[in-house]
Each structure stands twice: as structure tokens, then as C-alpha cells.
Image (tube, rainbow, N blue to C red):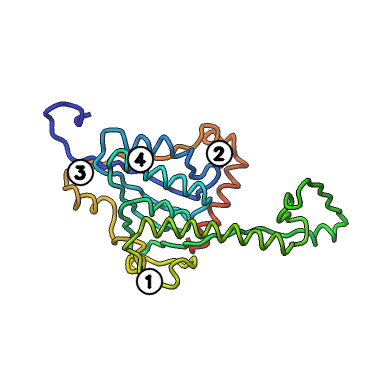
């Protein structure tokens, strides 16, 4: 309130947005552009902040949602002329790093995991199990590619080749995003875009991060010890908070747990 009273001095304001968890489809309980839209709008506009700090702890997820969230952050930053700083906690990998790259600077803990600039698709095949159970799978389509990668049918080489083309295109989009946002900072490392990950200072050394530090002391060094923090968190849908989406929450939780487990977390 003091910032709105004329002639009263107050410290610089930093809006802090927490970006926690896997990045998924809207309505699944994870991070999505839809779920973060209002939070980000408020963070960049309410009280005319001097900076926006992103607390990131995400193993990644949907490439489209990662792109949409990152683009929204950049759009709001440019429109409001507010610098953005990303502070990585346990992990900012894959889509989590895509979002981090939208910041003007990326700061990590010495033990943070960053990178995994790659694309992955995983599934299962159950056609042998169905055959053993005497179950016949019947699928009717209009369009030869409509049943691509059906897990209840034997793997098809054409389907795999088609999927690989899609993954390569997504990978190229990811690489282009990182090269644009980290222009002039990336080192010539042959493993940079292979899906490899780096820890803390090693991420700084290859240009994926700008420094080692933590949010409060970093901002105090930049804006002085009078800096004020205003926090914004993504709110879960009401039905989810009341337990009405239990099945979806369990599935989303398992997917998120698996995502963090890939990095030993």
C-alpha cells in the first residue's frame, strides 16, 4: 500500500513467481500457459515491479506449453519493460529450461541440474499380451496414419520414422529457442544439445546459466537491502483442491514424480 501513497518512499519491488512441477496439458493440474496466465499478468503489472523473479523447479513436460509460457513471459517483460531473473532450484531441465531461457539472467544453486535440451517420446507395446489372452484388436480408420503408434498393434517402421521426424523438428525448435535467448553466452560444447545435463557451476561454464546464487541475496545485491518481495503462486483449480479430480491428480502426480526421478530427485 505504501507504494501508492504520494511522497512516501518505499524500497524497490520484486515480484516472485513460483513455477513448480511438470509442464502439462491444461486442466491436468501441472503448469500450463492457461494455469499461469493470470499469475504472470499480475506479477508483471501489479504495483509496477522493478523486476520479476522466477523460482523454477521443473523437470519439463509439454514442448508446446513450455513454448507458450516462455513466450508469455517475454511478451509481458517487453511490454512492461521489466527485467526477468530465473532462479533454478533442484532442476530446470527440458521444458523447465525452455521456460528459464525466457529470463534475462539465469541463476542456479551449486547443486541445481540444468539442460536436457532434447525431446523424448515414450510409450508401451501390449500386442503380445493381447495375443496371449486370446483378445483380437479391431481398429477401423479413414486415413492410413490415423492409428499411428497404436500400443495394441505391432510396431510399424513407417510410424517410427514419422515420429522421429516430429521429434527432430521439436528438437530444432528447442535449439533455436536456446540459441536465440542465450546468444553470445553459449560455449562450443558438442554435448550442449544432446539432452545432456549440467550441475551448477558446470552449467555456468557452458553458458546455460549466468551465475551461482539465491534469490533474496542476489536481489539485495542488485536493488539494495530495502528491496521488497511480493509472491505469486499458481493456484490449483477449485475442484482439484476439493478432491473432485482425484484420479487426474494421481495420474498427474505419477507423471511428475517420474519426471523428477529421471534426474535422481
Q: Residue at x 41, y 62 (%)?
A: 113
Q: Going by the image, does 167 lie left or right of 191?
A: right
Q: Position of residue 150 (x, y in %)?
A: 73, 54
Observer-side mark, 3 or 1, equals 1
> Which structural element holds mark 2?
loop
Q: Quadrant of the N terminus?
A: top left
Which sits earlier in the primary sequence, circle 4 or circle 2?
2
The residue identified by callout 3 is: 227
Which of the numbered marks, if any, corresponds to residue 188? 1
Q: Residues within 10 Å of mark 4 (few under 14, many from 20)?
A: some
Quarter occupied by residue 81? top left
Q: Going by the image, does 251 lie left or right of 234?
A: right
Badge 1 vs badge 4, beta-carbon distance below 8 Å: no
Distance from disc 4 to disc 2, alpha carbons, whole Å, reads 23 Å
> Which structural element holds mark 4?
helix
Which of the numbered marks, if any, corresponds to residue 27? 2
Q: Going by the image, does 119 lie left or right of 192?
A: right
The residue identified by callout 4 is: 76
Distance from disc 4 to disc 3, alpha carbons, whole Å, reads 22 Å
Query: Is 177 or 127 nearer to us in this picture?
Result: 177
Which sits earlier in the primary sequence, circle 1 or circle 4?
4
Observer-side mark, 2 or 1, equals 1
Which sits earlier in the primary sequence, circle 2 or circle 1?
2
Which sits earlier in the primary sequence, circle 3 or circle 1?
1
Q: Residue at x 80, y 62 (%)?
A: 128
Amino acid at each position: 500500500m505504501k507504494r501508492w501513497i504520494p511522497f512516501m518512499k518505499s524500497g524497490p519491488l520484486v515480484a516472485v513467481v513460483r513455477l513448480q512441477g511438470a509442464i502439462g496439458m491444461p486442466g491436468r493440474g501441472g503448469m500450463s500457459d492457461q494455469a499461469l496466465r493470470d499469475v504472470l499478468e499480475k506479477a508483471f503489472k501489479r504495483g509496477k515491479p522493478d523486476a520479476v523473479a522466477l523460482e523454477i523447479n521443473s523437470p519439463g513436460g509439454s514442448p508446446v506449453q513450455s513454448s507458450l509460457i516462455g513466450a508469455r513471459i517475454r511478451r509481458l517483460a517487453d511490454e512492461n519493460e521489466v527485467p526477468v531473473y530465473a532462479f533454478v532450484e533442484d532442476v530446470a531441465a527440458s521444458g523447465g529450461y525452455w521456460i528459464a531461457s525466457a529470463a534475462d539472467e539465469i541463476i542456479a544453486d551449486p547443486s541445481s541440474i540444468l539442460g536436457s535440451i532434447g525431446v523424448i517420446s515414450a510409450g508401451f507395446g501390449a500386442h503380445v499380451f493381447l495375443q496371449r489372452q486370446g483378445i483380437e484388436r479391431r481398429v477401423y480408420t479413414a486415413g492410413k496414419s490415423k492409428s499411428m503408434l497404436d500400443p495394441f498393434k505391432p510396431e510399424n517402421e513407417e510410424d517410427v520414422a514419422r515420429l522421429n521426424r516430429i521429434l527432430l523438428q521439436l528438437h530444432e525448435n528447442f535449439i533455436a529457442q536456446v540459441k536465440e535467448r542465450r546468444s553470445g553466452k553459449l560455449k562450443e560444447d558438442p554435448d550442449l544439445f544432446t539432452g545432456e545435463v549440467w550441475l551448477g557451476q558446470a552449467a555456468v561454464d557452458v553458458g546455460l546459466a549466468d551465475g551461482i546464487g539465491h534469490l533474496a541475496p542476489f536481489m539485495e545485491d542488485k536493488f539494495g537491502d530495502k528491496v521488497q518481495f511480493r509472491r505469486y503462486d499458481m493456484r490449483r483449480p477449485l475442484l482439484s483442491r476439493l478432491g473432485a479430480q482425484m484420479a487426474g491428480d494421481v495420474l498427474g502426480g505419477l507423471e511428475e514424480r517420474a519426471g523428477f526421478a529421471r534426474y535422481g530427485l
